[in-house]
Amino acid sequence: MTCNELERLSVAGASEPELAAHRSVCSSCEALGAELERVSTFVSSLRSPAARPALLESLLSIPRKTVSCEGAAGLIAASLENDLPPADQARLGFHLSRCEGCSEAAGTLLGMRDLARPEPAPWLAGRIAANRPKRRDRRGWRFVLSPPAAIGLAYAAAVVVMLAGFNPADLARKAGVGRLEESARESVQVAGGSLADRLGAFEENALRKLAAWRGRAAGYGRAALSTAIALVMKTESRNPPSRPRSGEDKGSSQRNEIEVLTWRA
Amino acid sequence: MLNGTDEKSLVERCRKGEDEAWRELVDAFGQKIFSVAYHFTLKREDAEELAQEIFLRIFENLYRYDGSFPLVAWIVSLSRNLCIDRYRRRKREKSFHFVSDEAVLPMLTSQDDPAANALKKERTKILFSALAEIPEDLAEILVLRDLDGLAYEEIGQALALPDGTVKSRLFRARTEVAKKIRERQETRSGGTFASLAAVAGAFV
Protein backbone atom coordinates (compact mmCIF):
# COMPACT_ATOMS: atom_id res chain seq x y z
CA MET A 1 0.00 0.00 0.00
CA THR A 2 1.40 3.40 -1.00
CA CYS A 3 1.76 6.11 1.60
CA ASN A 4 0.42 9.52 0.57
CA GLU A 5 1.77 11.36 3.55
CA LEU A 6 4.71 12.80 1.63
CA GLU A 7 2.36 14.36 -0.92
CA ARG A 8 0.09 15.66 1.83
CA LEU A 9 2.99 17.23 3.67
CA SER A 10 4.42 18.77 0.48
CA VAL A 11 1.09 20.30 -0.53
CA ALA A 12 0.55 21.60 2.99
CA GLY A 13 3.90 23.37 2.77
CA ALA A 14 5.65 21.32 5.44
CA SER A 15 9.22 22.24 6.33
CA GLU A 16 12.24 20.14 5.42
CA PRO A 17 12.62 18.70 8.96
CA GLU A 18 8.98 17.61 8.95
CA LEU A 19 9.41 15.89 5.60
CA ALA A 20 12.66 14.28 6.72
CA ALA A 21 11.00 13.04 9.91
CA HIS A 22 8.33 11.25 7.95
CA ARG A 23 10.77 9.86 5.39
CA SER A 24 12.87 8.42 8.15
CA VAL A 25 9.99 6.23 9.34
CA CYS A 26 8.36 5.43 5.95
CA SER A 27 10.44 3.45 3.47
CA SER A 28 8.15 4.03 0.45
CA CYS A 29 8.11 7.79 1.02
CA GLU A 30 11.86 7.76 1.51
CA ALA A 31 12.32 6.04 -1.87
CA LEU A 32 9.89 8.38 -3.59
CA GLY A 33 11.42 11.46 -1.97
CA ALA A 34 14.89 10.46 -3.02
CA GLU A 35 13.73 9.91 -6.59
CA LEU A 36 12.00 13.27 -6.70
CA GLU A 37 15.04 15.01 -5.32
CA ARG A 38 17.24 13.48 -8.01
CA VAL A 39 14.89 14.59 -10.78
CA SER A 40 14.52 18.08 -9.32
CA THR A 41 18.24 18.49 -8.89
CA PHE A 42 18.86 17.44 -12.44
CA VAL A 43 16.13 19.68 -13.87
CA SER A 44 17.41 22.70 -12.00
CA SER A 45 20.91 22.04 -13.35
CA LEU A 46 19.72 22.66 -16.90
CA ARG A 47 20.29 26.12 -18.20
CA SER A 48 17.71 28.24 -19.94
CA PRO A 49 18.10 28.25 -23.71
CA ALA A 50 19.53 31.62 -24.73
CA ALA A 51 17.61 33.80 -27.14
CA ARG A 52 19.55 35.05 -30.14
CA PRO A 53 20.22 38.78 -30.42
CA ALA A 54 18.26 38.84 -33.68
CA LEU A 55 15.17 37.72 -31.82
CA LEU A 56 15.56 40.46 -29.21
CA GLU A 57 16.00 43.04 -31.97
CA SER A 58 12.88 41.73 -33.61
CA LEU A 59 10.97 42.02 -30.34
CA LEU A 60 12.12 45.63 -29.99
CA SER A 61 10.65 46.49 -33.38
CA ILE A 62 7.16 45.30 -32.44
CA PRO A 63 5.78 48.80 -31.63
CA ARG A 64 6.67 49.86 -35.18
CA LYS A 65 5.07 46.75 -36.59
CA THR A 66 1.66 46.66 -34.96
CA VAL A 67 -0.69 48.64 -32.78
CA SER A 68 -2.70 47.76 -29.70
CA CYS A 69 -6.45 47.22 -29.84
CA GLU A 70 -6.71 50.46 -27.89
CA GLY A 71 -4.73 52.40 -30.50
CA ALA A 72 -6.37 50.63 -33.42
CA ALA A 73 -9.67 52.42 -32.76
CA GLY A 74 -8.09 55.81 -33.42
CA LEU A 75 -6.32 54.58 -36.53
CA ILE A 76 -9.53 53.05 -37.89
CA ALA A 77 -11.28 56.39 -37.38
CA ALA A 78 -8.45 58.20 -39.14
CA SER A 79 -8.45 55.72 -41.99
CA LEU A 80 -12.14 56.45 -42.55
CA GLU A 81 -11.10 60.04 -43.21
CA ASN A 82 -8.28 58.84 -45.50
CA ASP A 83 -6.00 60.70 -43.13
CA LEU A 84 -3.56 57.97 -42.15
CA PRO A 85 0.20 58.05 -42.84
CA PRO A 86 1.52 54.98 -44.68
CA ALA A 87 3.44 53.73 -41.63
CA ASP A 88 0.31 53.78 -39.48
CA GLN A 89 -1.66 52.23 -42.31
CA ALA A 90 0.80 49.34 -42.34
CA ARG A 91 0.63 48.95 -38.54
CA LEU A 92 -3.15 48.98 -38.64
CA GLY A 93 -3.23 46.48 -41.49
CA PHE A 94 -0.92 44.15 -39.60
CA HIS A 95 -3.04 44.40 -36.46
CA LEU A 96 -6.28 43.84 -38.35
CA SER A 97 -4.82 40.72 -39.94
CA ARG A 98 -4.32 39.30 -36.44
CA CYS A 99 -7.17 40.69 -34.36
CA GLU A 100 -10.61 39.40 -35.15
CA GLY A 101 -12.47 41.96 -33.03
CA CYS A 102 -10.74 45.01 -34.51
CA SER A 103 -10.99 43.54 -38.00
CA GLU A 104 -14.72 43.11 -37.58
CA ALA A 105 -15.09 46.67 -36.29
CA ALA A 106 -13.04 48.12 -39.14
CA GLY A 107 -14.90 46.06 -41.73
CA THR A 108 -18.24 47.22 -40.40
CA LEU A 109 -17.25 50.88 -40.35
CA LEU A 110 -15.63 50.85 -43.77
CA GLY A 111 -18.53 48.85 -45.18
CA MET A 112 -20.95 51.66 -44.33
CA ARG A 113 -19.77 53.53 -47.40
CA ASP A 114 -20.73 50.68 -49.66
CA LEU A 115 -24.27 50.40 -48.37
CA ALA A 116 -26.91 51.12 -51.05
CA ARG A 117 -28.94 54.23 -50.40
CA PRO A 118 -32.65 53.48 -50.22
CA GLU A 119 -34.65 55.07 -53.07
CA PRO A 120 -37.29 57.58 -51.92
CA ALA A 121 -40.93 57.08 -52.88
CA PRO A 122 -41.84 58.85 -56.14
CA TRP A 123 -44.33 61.13 -54.42
CA LEU A 124 -41.89 62.24 -51.68
CA ALA A 125 -40.09 65.00 -53.60
CA GLY A 126 -43.32 66.64 -54.70
CA ARG A 127 -44.76 66.53 -51.21
CA ILE A 128 -41.66 68.05 -49.67
CA ALA A 129 -41.69 70.81 -52.26
CA ALA A 130 -45.34 71.51 -51.59
CA ASN A 131 -44.91 71.62 -47.84
CA ARG A 132 -41.81 73.72 -47.86
CA PRO A 133 -42.38 76.80 -45.70
CA LYS A 134 -41.90 80.14 -47.39
CA ARG A 135 -38.76 81.85 -46.39
CA ARG A 136 -39.21 85.10 -44.61
CA ASP A 137 -37.67 87.99 -46.44
CA ARG A 138 -34.98 89.31 -44.18
CA ARG A 139 -33.58 91.70 -46.67
CA GLY A 140 -34.07 95.48 -46.70
CA TRP A 141 -36.22 97.30 -44.21
CA ARG A 142 -37.86 94.10 -42.93
CA PHE A 143 -34.60 93.22 -41.33
CA VAL A 144 -34.84 96.34 -39.19
CA LEU A 145 -38.05 94.96 -37.66
CA SER A 146 -36.48 91.67 -36.69
CA PRO A 147 -35.68 91.11 -32.97
CA PRO A 148 -31.91 90.82 -33.44
CA ALA A 149 -31.84 94.07 -35.37
CA ALA A 150 -33.98 95.82 -32.74
CA ILE A 151 -31.68 94.68 -29.97
CA GLY A 152 -28.66 95.75 -31.95
CA LEU A 153 -30.12 99.16 -32.64
CA ALA A 154 -31.01 99.60 -28.96
CA TYR A 155 -27.47 98.84 -27.94
CA ALA A 156 -26.11 101.16 -30.62
CA ALA A 157 -28.37 103.94 -29.40
CA ALA A 158 -27.25 103.39 -25.83
CA VAL A 159 -23.63 103.57 -26.88
CA VAL A 160 -24.23 106.79 -28.81
CA VAL A 161 -25.99 108.32 -25.81
CA MET A 162 -23.16 107.35 -23.53
CA LEU A 163 -20.57 108.69 -25.94
CA ALA A 164 -22.52 111.94 -26.11
CA GLY A 165 -21.91 112.40 -22.40
CA PHE A 166 -25.24 111.37 -20.94
CA ASN A 167 -25.39 109.26 -17.88
CA PRO A 168 -27.92 106.46 -18.59
CA ALA A 169 -28.77 106.10 -14.92
CA ASP A 170 -29.43 109.81 -14.58
CA LEU A 171 -31.55 109.80 -17.74
CA ALA A 172 -33.59 106.92 -16.43
CA ARG A 173 -34.16 108.67 -13.12
CA LYS A 174 -35.24 111.90 -14.87
CA ALA A 175 -37.54 109.98 -17.17
CA GLY A 176 -39.14 108.33 -14.15
CA VAL A 177 -39.73 111.66 -12.43
CA GLY A 178 -41.17 113.09 -15.66
CA ARG A 179 -43.60 110.22 -15.94
CA LEU A 180 -44.75 110.77 -12.36
CA GLU A 181 -45.37 114.45 -12.99
CA GLU A 182 -47.34 113.78 -16.15
CA SER A 183 -49.44 111.18 -14.34
CA ALA A 184 -50.22 113.68 -11.58
CA ARG A 185 -51.31 116.32 -14.11
CA GLU A 186 -53.69 113.87 -15.75
CA SER A 187 -55.16 113.05 -12.37
CA VAL A 188 -55.80 116.73 -11.65
CA GLN A 189 -57.49 117.20 -15.03
CA VAL A 190 -59.74 114.24 -14.44
CA ALA A 191 -60.56 115.50 -10.97
CA GLY A 192 -61.48 118.99 -12.31
CA GLY A 193 -63.70 117.54 -15.01
CA SER A 194 -64.80 119.19 -18.24
CA LEU A 195 -68.42 120.07 -19.26
CA ALA A 196 -68.50 117.26 -21.74
CA ASP A 197 -67.49 114.77 -19.05
CA ARG A 198 -70.18 116.08 -16.75
CA LEU A 199 -72.86 115.89 -19.46
CA GLY A 200 -71.82 112.40 -20.29
CA ALA A 201 -71.99 111.34 -16.66
CA PHE A 202 -75.45 112.92 -16.31
CA GLU A 203 -76.70 111.13 -19.43
CA GLU A 204 -75.37 107.84 -18.25
CA ASN A 205 -77.03 108.28 -14.86
CA ALA A 206 -80.36 109.20 -16.44
CA LEU A 207 -80.29 106.21 -18.74
CA ARG A 208 -79.51 103.93 -15.82
CA LYS A 209 -82.49 105.28 -13.83
CA LEU A 210 -84.82 105.06 -16.81
CA ALA A 211 -83.89 101.43 -17.30
CA ALA A 212 -84.60 100.79 -13.64
CA TRP A 213 -88.03 102.43 -13.81
CA ARG A 214 -88.86 100.54 -16.99
CA GLY A 215 -88.06 97.30 -15.24
CA ARG A 216 -90.18 98.18 -12.30
CA ALA A 217 -93.14 99.17 -14.52
CA ALA A 218 -92.93 95.91 -16.39
CA GLY A 219 -92.90 94.04 -13.11
CA TYR A 220 -95.94 95.86 -11.78
CA GLY A 221 -97.81 95.23 -15.06
CA ARG A 222 -97.12 91.50 -14.92
CA ALA A 223 -98.23 91.38 -11.30
CA ALA A 224 -101.52 93.19 -12.06
CA LEU A 225 -102.30 90.92 -14.98
CA SER A 226 -101.72 87.77 -12.98
CA THR A 227 -103.92 89.08 -10.16
CA ALA A 228 -106.75 89.77 -12.62
CA ILE A 229 -106.51 86.29 -14.11
CA ALA A 230 -106.57 84.78 -10.65
CA LEU A 231 -109.71 86.72 -9.80
CA VAL A 232 -111.47 85.62 -13.00
CA MET A 233 -110.53 82.01 -12.38
CA LYS A 234 -111.80 82.20 -8.85
CA THR A 235 -115.19 83.55 -9.99
CA GLU A 236 -115.62 80.92 -12.71
CA SER A 237 -114.83 77.99 -10.39
CA ARG A 238 -117.81 78.83 -8.10
CA ASN A 239 -120.40 78.08 -10.91
CA PRO A 240 -119.16 75.25 -13.13
CA PRO A 241 -121.43 74.40 -16.10
CA SER A 242 -123.81 71.52 -15.41
CA ARG A 243 -124.03 68.47 -17.66
CA PRO A 244 -127.48 67.34 -19.01
CA ARG A 245 -128.75 64.19 -17.32
CA SER A 246 -131.26 63.05 -19.97
CA GLY A 247 -131.32 62.92 -23.73
CA GLU A 248 -134.23 65.30 -24.05
CA ASP A 249 -132.38 68.49 -23.91
CA LYS A 250 -129.65 67.81 -26.38
CA GLY A 251 -129.36 71.30 -27.56
CA SER A 252 -128.67 72.71 -24.11
CA SER A 253 -126.31 69.81 -23.51
CA GLN A 254 -124.21 70.74 -26.52
CA ARG A 255 -124.14 74.36 -25.41
CA ASN A 256 -122.96 73.34 -21.94
CA GLU A 257 -120.26 71.15 -23.44
CA ILE A 258 -118.89 74.09 -25.37
CA GLU A 259 -118.91 76.18 -22.19
CA VAL A 260 -116.96 73.54 -20.31
CA LEU A 261 -114.38 73.29 -23.02
CA THR A 262 -114.10 77.05 -23.17
CA TRP A 263 -113.73 77.22 -19.40
CA ARG A 264 -111.04 74.59 -19.45
CA ALA A 265 -109.27 76.30 -22.23
CA MET B 1 13.89 42.95 -10.68
CA LEU B 2 10.87 45.16 -11.04
CA ASN B 3 8.37 45.65 -8.23
CA GLY B 4 4.64 46.12 -8.68
CA THR B 5 4.72 49.91 -8.99
CA ASP B 6 7.64 49.81 -11.39
CA GLU B 7 5.88 47.24 -13.53
CA LYS B 8 2.71 49.29 -13.71
CA SER B 9 4.58 52.46 -14.59
CA LEU B 10 6.61 50.54 -17.14
CA VAL B 11 3.43 49.33 -18.78
CA GLU B 12 2.00 52.85 -18.73
CA ARG B 13 5.10 54.18 -20.44
CA CYS B 14 4.91 51.44 -23.04
CA ARG B 15 1.30 52.36 -23.71
CA LYS B 16 2.33 55.95 -24.27
CA GLY B 17 4.70 54.74 -26.96
CA GLU B 18 8.03 55.21 -25.20
CA ASP B 19 10.60 53.13 -27.06
CA GLU B 20 12.87 53.03 -24.02
CA ALA B 21 10.11 51.54 -21.87
CA TRP B 22 9.45 48.83 -24.42
CA ARG B 23 13.18 48.07 -24.50
CA GLU B 24 13.14 47.69 -20.71
CA LEU B 25 10.21 45.31 -20.93
CA VAL B 26 11.91 43.20 -23.61
CA ASP B 27 15.14 43.14 -21.59
CA ALA B 28 13.25 42.07 -18.47
CA PHE B 29 11.09 39.36 -20.00
CA GLY B 30 12.44 38.50 -23.45
CA GLN B 31 14.82 35.82 -22.29
CA LYS B 32 12.33 34.24 -19.91
CA ILE B 33 9.56 34.14 -22.49
CA PHE B 34 11.89 32.62 -25.06
CA SER B 35 12.85 30.00 -22.49
CA VAL B 36 9.22 29.12 -21.78
CA ALA B 37 8.51 28.98 -25.50
CA TYR B 38 11.51 26.73 -26.08
CA HIS B 39 10.49 24.28 -23.38
CA PHE B 40 7.09 23.92 -25.00
CA THR B 41 8.35 23.61 -28.59
CA LEU B 42 11.88 22.16 -28.26
CA LYS B 43 12.77 23.80 -31.58
CA ARG B 44 14.57 27.10 -31.85
CA GLU B 45 12.72 28.42 -34.88
CA ASP B 46 9.36 27.52 -33.43
CA ALA B 47 10.32 29.02 -30.08
CA GLU B 48 11.41 32.28 -31.70
CA GLU B 49 8.21 32.46 -33.67
CA LEU B 50 6.19 31.72 -30.54
CA ALA B 51 8.11 34.33 -28.51
CA GLN B 52 7.42 36.94 -31.19
CA GLU B 53 3.76 36.04 -31.18
CA ILE B 54 3.67 36.30 -27.39
CA PHE B 55 5.28 39.73 -27.42
CA LEU B 56 2.95 40.92 -30.14
CA ARG B 57 0.09 39.84 -27.94
CA ILE B 58 1.67 41.56 -24.94
CA PHE B 59 1.99 44.81 -26.86
CA GLU B 60 -1.54 44.64 -28.20
CA ASN B 61 -3.00 43.94 -24.76
CA LEU B 62 -0.92 46.22 -22.54
CA TYR B 63 -3.94 48.39 -21.90
CA ARG B 64 -5.60 45.45 -20.15
CA TYR B 65 -2.89 45.15 -17.49
CA ASP B 66 -4.18 46.64 -14.25
CA GLY B 67 -1.25 45.75 -11.97
CA SER B 68 -3.35 43.45 -9.79
CA PHE B 69 -0.70 40.72 -10.05
CA PRO B 70 2.93 40.48 -11.16
CA LEU B 71 3.67 41.29 -14.76
CA VAL B 72 5.37 37.96 -15.36
CA ALA B 73 2.25 36.11 -14.23
CA TRP B 74 0.12 38.29 -16.51
CA ILE B 75 2.47 37.60 -19.42
CA VAL B 76 2.43 33.86 -18.78
CA SER B 77 -1.36 33.86 -18.55
CA LEU B 78 -1.48 35.77 -21.84
CA SER B 79 0.92 33.36 -23.54
CA ARG B 80 -0.47 30.19 -22.03
CA ASN B 81 -2.95 29.41 -24.78
CA LEU B 82 -0.34 30.01 -27.46
CA CYS B 83 2.11 27.69 -25.70
CA ILE B 84 -0.49 24.99 -25.20
CA ASP B 85 -1.53 25.28 -28.86
CA ARG B 86 2.06 24.77 -29.96
CA TYR B 87 2.49 21.92 -27.52
CA ARG B 88 -0.60 20.15 -28.89
CA ARG B 89 0.53 20.77 -32.45
CA ARG B 90 3.83 19.16 -31.61
CA LYS B 91 2.02 16.33 -29.89
CA ARG B 92 0.28 15.46 -33.15
CA GLU B 93 3.63 15.01 -34.87
CA LYS B 94 5.01 11.49 -35.14
CA SER B 95 8.32 12.58 -33.64
CA PHE B 96 6.68 14.00 -30.51
CA HIS B 97 8.07 11.32 -28.21
CA PHE B 98 11.46 11.40 -29.85
CA VAL B 99 13.72 14.14 -28.51
CA SER B 100 16.67 14.94 -30.73
CA ASP B 101 20.17 15.96 -29.69
CA GLU B 102 19.65 19.41 -31.22
CA ALA B 103 16.57 19.91 -29.10
CA VAL B 104 18.39 19.52 -25.82
CA LEU B 105 21.73 21.13 -26.71
CA PRO B 106 20.65 24.71 -25.89
CA MET B 107 19.89 23.58 -22.34
CA LEU B 108 23.25 22.00 -21.66
CA THR B 109 26.24 23.72 -20.21
CA SER B 110 29.46 22.60 -21.85
CA GLN B 111 31.75 20.75 -19.52
CA ASP B 112 35.30 19.67 -19.94
CA ASP B 113 34.46 16.01 -19.63
CA PRO B 114 32.93 14.69 -22.88
CA ALA B 115 31.53 11.67 -21.10
CA ALA B 116 29.72 13.87 -18.60
CA ASN B 117 28.37 15.94 -21.45
CA ALA B 118 27.07 12.87 -23.20
CA LEU B 119 25.49 11.57 -20.03
CA LYS B 120 23.74 14.84 -19.30
CA LYS B 121 22.48 15.07 -22.86
CA GLU B 122 21.07 11.59 -22.54
CA ARG B 123 19.37 12.38 -19.26
CA THR B 124 17.86 15.53 -20.68
CA LYS B 125 16.45 13.63 -23.61
CA ILE B 126 14.95 11.10 -21.22
CA LEU B 127 13.51 13.88 -19.11
CA PHE B 128 11.74 15.54 -22.06
CA SER B 129 10.52 12.21 -23.38
CA ALA B 130 8.99 11.56 -19.98
CA LEU B 131 7.45 15.04 -19.95
CA ALA B 132 5.79 14.28 -23.27
CA GLU B 133 4.08 11.28 -21.75
CA ILE B 134 2.43 12.91 -18.78
CA PRO B 135 -0.83 14.95 -18.98
CA GLU B 136 -0.28 18.43 -20.37
CA ASP B 137 -1.61 20.24 -17.30
CA LEU B 138 1.02 18.48 -15.19
CA ALA B 139 3.77 19.04 -17.76
CA GLU B 140 2.86 22.72 -17.95
CA ILE B 141 3.29 23.25 -14.21
CA LEU B 142 6.55 21.30 -14.10
CA VAL B 143 7.99 23.38 -16.94
CA LEU B 144 6.95 26.67 -15.36
CA ARG B 145 8.20 25.77 -11.90
CA ASP B 146 11.28 23.61 -12.35
CA LEU B 147 12.52 24.69 -15.78
CA ASP B 148 11.53 28.35 -15.85
CA GLY B 149 11.71 29.07 -12.15
CA LEU B 150 8.36 30.76 -11.56
CA ALA B 151 7.15 31.02 -7.96
CA TYR B 152 4.10 29.09 -6.77
CA GLU B 153 2.12 32.32 -6.48
CA GLU B 154 3.05 33.41 -9.98
CA ILE B 155 2.03 30.05 -11.42
CA GLY B 156 -1.23 30.17 -9.48
CA GLN B 157 -2.00 33.65 -10.76
CA ALA B 158 -1.02 32.79 -14.32
CA LEU B 159 -3.09 29.61 -14.44
CA ALA B 160 -5.86 30.90 -12.14
CA LEU B 161 -5.28 28.09 -9.66
CA PRO B 162 -5.04 28.14 -5.86
CA ASP B 163 -1.61 27.52 -4.34
CA GLY B 164 -2.66 24.16 -2.95
CA THR B 165 -3.67 22.95 -6.40
CA VAL B 166 -0.39 24.16 -7.87
CA LYS B 167 1.61 22.30 -5.24
CA SER B 168 -0.50 19.19 -5.57
CA ARG B 169 -0.19 19.15 -9.36
CA LEU B 170 3.51 19.81 -9.15
CA PHE B 171 3.99 16.90 -6.78
CA ARG B 172 2.02 14.63 -9.10
CA ALA B 173 3.95 15.90 -12.12
CA ARG B 174 7.29 15.17 -10.49
CA THR B 175 6.09 11.76 -9.37
CA GLU B 176 4.81 10.93 -12.85
CA VAL B 177 8.02 12.07 -14.52
CA ALA B 178 10.11 10.09 -12.08
CA LYS B 179 7.95 7.06 -12.75
CA LYS B 180 8.24 7.46 -16.53
CA ILE B 181 12.00 7.83 -16.29
CA ARG B 182 12.23 4.70 -14.20
CA GLU B 183 10.04 2.75 -16.63
CA ARG B 184 12.04 3.92 -19.61
CA GLN B 185 15.28 2.97 -18.02
CA GLU B 186 13.92 -0.44 -17.05
CA THR B 187 12.80 -1.03 -20.64
CA ARG B 188 16.16 0.03 -22.07
CA SER B 189 18.13 -2.03 -19.62
CA GLY B 190 16.10 -5.14 -20.31
CA GLY B 191 15.02 -5.34 -16.73
CA THR B 192 18.31 -6.56 -15.36
CA PHE B 193 19.02 -5.46 -11.87
CA ALA B 194 22.50 -4.25 -12.66
CA SER B 195 21.40 -1.99 -15.50
CA LEU B 196 18.59 -0.56 -13.40
CA ALA B 197 21.00 0.33 -10.68
CA ALA B 198 23.32 1.97 -13.18
CA VAL B 199 20.57 4.06 -14.74
CA ALA B 200 19.14 5.08 -11.40
CA GLY B 201 22.57 6.15 -10.38
CA ALA B 202 22.81 8.32 -13.46
CA PHE B 203 20.23 10.66 -11.96
CA VAL B 204 22.09 11.00 -8.69
Image (spheres, rainbow, N blue to C red):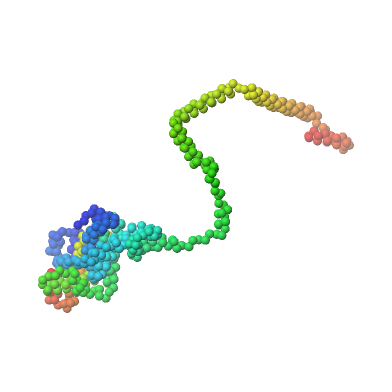
- Residue B131 lies in quadrant: bottom left
**Split into 4 quadrants, where in the image is the N terminus of chain B?**
bottom left
For this orientation, the residue located farthest to the top is: A192
Q: Position of residue A1 (x, y in %)?
A: 19, 68
Locate residue A187, reporting x and y percent: 56, 24
A76 left or right, relative to A136: left
List the single residue furthest toward the bottom.
Answer: B190
Horizontally, residue A263 falls left or right of residue A173, namely: right
In the rendered view, tell whether residue A91 sits above or below residue A165: below
Q: Is residue B7 visible?
A: yes
Residue B180 position, x and y percent, is 20, 71
- Toward the viewer: A62 or A248? A62
Q: Is residue B25 visible?
A: no
Q: Nearer the viewer, residue B132 or B108?
A: B108
Name the residue at 87% across, 37% down.
A250
Quadrant occupied by the C terminus of chain B: bottom left
Q: Nearer the viewer, residue B58 or A118?
A: A118
In the displayed orientation, state which residue is furthest to the left.
Answer: B113
Q: At 12% from the left edge and 70% from the top edge, which residue is drawn? A: B111
Tell whether A260 sits left or right of B171. Answer: right
Identified at 37% across, 63% down, the residue is A103
Q: Position of residue A87 (x, y in %)?
A: 33, 62
Q: Relative to the observer, which residue lies in front, B184 or A241?
A: B184
Seen at 25% across and 68% down, the residue is B47
Q: Quadrant of residue A207?
A: top right
How many circles with numbers are drawn on the protein? Answer: 0
